[in-house]
């Protein structure tokens, strides 16, 4: 490797290797304008000059600033460009974490049939993925989604499995759901849960996921508070998906209300209904509590309701 | 049953084994590929589940091939069945089959080291000489689906013939019983998984029809075999109540209930990650549409009130025909036993003990010790 200054016109960026989503070009431009290029661009000599395979954002900034002479690191041509890419990736990952979209783009790059196999192994180890086709393909599939959805998904810690949920939607619904989430400041993980529910209901009812979601939105009582609204949407969708469980829970709630239990008694049950029966906690702090509990529990009406709850 | 083995992959260590020679000779049109045993994993890696249904691997396996059924976590009860894993995967393609997720991308596999399995069984029987063991080959494979190629059914039945304190159950969705019927049926149970016709047609691809299974069961019974039926997995679909009642009626109008050693019931359940496999492989299947929750063992299952209805419908119908039949649940909670069957085993060992009691009482011709609860503690 040697450091050289090279004319910008001699550098040909190979965008095949571009994976970064880091996009604050204004800040980068002003930084270069003020302090110059701090890190020389890595290039490799080729027939018509020099090939650039990393540092694309910096290259674009230099171009925009009309800087003609660029400090570069000219790398050894004996080593393949793929291996150089792996080395640059390692440095990149030491400096900053990579997001899901970047991981997907890297998977796409290293899955090219001509990509060097040792470099591929290196890259996978750097991005902490196993060399399993099924997993790598699932990352690459993220790139089939519309660009706005890709960017939305790369914002937080959404998993690739949650991304697959988006893929189950058609392209129009993918964008509709994403736009709604952006408007409401909903995180990708939360949106994935909502889409999953809509998909399950749609499959059962043979309807469209977004129309189900729209119908639920129209019934939303309060949309001022984001957290409350989100919880309401989820609850309404869950009620649609689990009609019998919802009916069971409703019946339990009605029974509990009818019990008119004294304050010292707390009644709860397993919300999934998996464990039958009820949990009754009695907190006796005074003789008054004891007598009110006894009076309440001896009532045959109360006993009938409890019996009903236990049997349900 | 319609399926075709297009390719045989043979582990280089088993080329000369009798099973390999027999299977190869019975599949003259199949491609045969002999692979060095160390390269097998690489060879199999890229084969999809669907492709794997047309490929048979004959190999050898180190480690335990006879082991307790993996069961599930408490509070759900399990019966302490012992599984013989001489084969993996099966040529049928049921949408709900847990092997899709459990074994990953496995091709159909048969292990040719029968001697090792025999010695493992004998060692197990000798380790608890007073316990009654129920063995089965139908946990990770269909016991009879490949029998026209392997002849393993008769070998198993012969191996267990008159062996004290044990029996073998061969569980299937096929009607391939010709091989089994060649053997003498002393300690052998031929068992069928059953479901309504609507479900078999839609969700049990390449499996035999219910009628064909019951005709086979009748032939097995006439040949002196004990029978078992497994309503597992029971699946909810529109009209399931009458459909399941019809299955019970068909069973009891075809075979003599006195020859049925047990009937099991288990509702559709699966590990959470498995739903993706079903959605991907069978996008048209409706089996994931019902109300399911994550159970106390982490598996997805129908909500309890639905399972109760499902079980009650079938149990009530069975009881109309035979009140004494031994019924049990696979992976159900104690309260389900109590509510539907009217009793609850204290634990898995206690359930195992009740199996032995029932067999001793109803099938006195089987050579077995009088069950003692002390022999059945875990």
Image (tube, grey):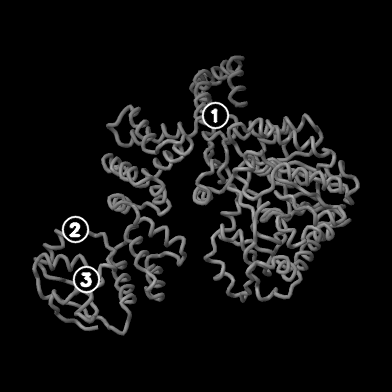
Give the CA distance from mark 1 to mark 3.
Answer: 70 Å
| Residue on which the image places disc 3 | A13
| Residue on which the image places disc 1 | A281
Q: Quarter of the image holding residue B241?
A: top right
Please report whichever mark, 1 or 2, sits nearer to the chain's N-terminal start. Answer: 2
Residue B79 in the image: above or below residue A306: below
Q: Which mark is residue A91?
A: none
Residue A304 in the image: above or below residue B358: above
Residue B77 shows in the view: yes
Left or right: where A143 falls relative to B202: left
Task: Please identify the quadrant where the C terminus of chain A is shown.
Answer: top right
Q: How would you rate the neighbour count of disc 3 (Cα within 10 Å): few for under 14, some for 14-19, many for 20 or more?
A: some
Subunit under mark 1: A
Q: How would you rate the neighbour count of disc 2 (Cα within 10 Å): few for under 14, some for 14-19, many for 20 or more?
A: few
Please report whichever mark, 1 or 3, sits nearer to the chain's N-terminal start. Answer: 3
Foreground of the two, B253 or B226: B253
Give the CA distance from mark 1 to mark 2.
Answer: 57 Å
Looking at the rendered structure, the secondary structure element under dot 2 is loop
Looking at the rendered structure, the secondary structure element under dot 3 is strand
Looking at the rendered structure, the secondary structure element under dot 1 is strand
Q: Are marks 3 and 2 in contact (CB under 8 Å)?
A: no
Q: Quarter of the image holding residue B101?
A: bottom right
x and y percent of residue A8 in the render?
Answer: 13, 74
| Residue on which the image places disc 2 | A24
């Amino acid at each position: 490797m040697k450091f050289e200054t090279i004319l910008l016109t001699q550098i040909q960026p190979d965008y095949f290797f571009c994976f970064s989503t880091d996009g604050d070009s204004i800040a980068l431009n002003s930084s270069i304008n003020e302090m110059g290029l701090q890190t020389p661009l890595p290039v490799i000599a080729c027939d018509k000059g020099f090939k650039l395979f990393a540092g694309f954002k910096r290259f674009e900034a230099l171009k925009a600033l009309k800087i003609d002479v660029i400090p570069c690191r000219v790398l050894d041509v004996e080593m393949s460009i793929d291996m150089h890419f792996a080395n640059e990736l390692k440095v990149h990952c030491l400096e900053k974490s990579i997001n899901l979209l970047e991981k997907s783009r890297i998977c796409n790059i290293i899955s090219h049939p001509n990509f060097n196999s040792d470099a591929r192994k290196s890259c996978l180890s750097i991005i902490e993925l196993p060399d399993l086709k099924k997993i790598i393909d699932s990352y690459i599939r993220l790139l089939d989604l519309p660009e706005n959805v890709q960017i939305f998904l790369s914002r937080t810690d959404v998993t690739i499995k949650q991304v697959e949920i988006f893929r189950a939607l058609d392209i129009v619904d993918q964008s509709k759901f994403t736009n709604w989430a952006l408007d409401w400041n909903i995180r990708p993980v939360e949106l994935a849960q909502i889409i999953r529910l809509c998909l399950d209901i749609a499959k059962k009812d043979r309807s469209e996921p977004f129309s189900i979601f729209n119908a639920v939105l129209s019934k939303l009582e309060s949309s001022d508070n984001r957290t409350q609204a989100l919880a309401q949407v989820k609850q309404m969708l869950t009620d649609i998906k689990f009609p019998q469980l919802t009916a069971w829970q409703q019946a339990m709630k009605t029974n509990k209300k009818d019990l008119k239990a004294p304050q010292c008694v707390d009644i709860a049950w397993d919300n999934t209904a998996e464990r039958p029966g009820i949990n009754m906690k009695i907190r006796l702090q005074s003789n008054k509590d004891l007598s009110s509990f006894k009076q309440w529990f001896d009532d045959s009406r109360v006993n009938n309701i409890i019996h009903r709850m236990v049997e349900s | 049953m319609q399926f075709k083995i297009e390719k045989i992959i043979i582990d280089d260590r088993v080329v000369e084994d009798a099973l390999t020679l027999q299977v190869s000779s019975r599949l003259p049109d199949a491609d045969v590929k002999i692979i060095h045993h160390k390269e097998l994993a690489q060879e199999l890696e890229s084969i999809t589940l669907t492709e794997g249904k047309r490929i048979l691997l004959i190999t050898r396996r180190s480690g335990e091939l006879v082991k307790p059924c993996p069961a599930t976590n408490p509070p759900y009860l399990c019966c302490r069945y012992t599984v013989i894993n001489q084969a993996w995967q099966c040529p049928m393609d049921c949408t709900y089959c847990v092997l899709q997720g459990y074994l990953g991308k496995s091709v159909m596999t048969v292990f040719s080291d029968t001697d090792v399995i025999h010695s493992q069984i004998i060692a197990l029987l000798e380790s608890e000489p007073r316990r009654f063991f129920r063995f089965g080959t139908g946990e990770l494979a269909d016991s009879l689906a490949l029998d026209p190629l392997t002849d393993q059914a008769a070998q198993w039945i012969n191996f267990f013939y008159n062996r004290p304190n044990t029996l073998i159950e061969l569980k299937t969705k096929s009607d391939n019983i010709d091989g089994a019927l060649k053997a003498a049926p002393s300690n052998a149970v031929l068992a069928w998984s059953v479901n309504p016709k609507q479900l078999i047609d839609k969700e049990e691809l390449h499996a035999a029809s219910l009628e064909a299974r019951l005709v086979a069961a009748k032939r097995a019974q006439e040949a002196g075999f004990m029978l078992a039926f497994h309503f597992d997995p029971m699946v909810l679909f529109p009209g399931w109540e009458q459909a399941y009642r019809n299955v019970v009626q068909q069973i009891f109008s075809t075979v003599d209930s006195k020859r049925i050693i047990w009937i099991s019931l288990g509702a559709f359940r699966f590990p959470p990650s498995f739903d993706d496999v079903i959605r991907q492989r069978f996008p048209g299947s409706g089996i994931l549409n019902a109300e399911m929750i994550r159970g106390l063992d982490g598996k997805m299952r129908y909500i309890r009130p639905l399972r109760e209805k499902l079980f009650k419908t079938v149990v009530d119908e069975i009881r109309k025909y035979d009140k004494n039949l031994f019924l049990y649940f696979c992976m159900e909670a104690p309260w389900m036993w109590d509510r539907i069957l009217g009793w609850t085993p204290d634990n898995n060992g206690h359930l195992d003990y009740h199996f032995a009691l029932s067999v001793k009482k109803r099938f006195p011709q089987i050579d077995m010790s009088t069950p003692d609860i002390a022999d059945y503690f875990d």
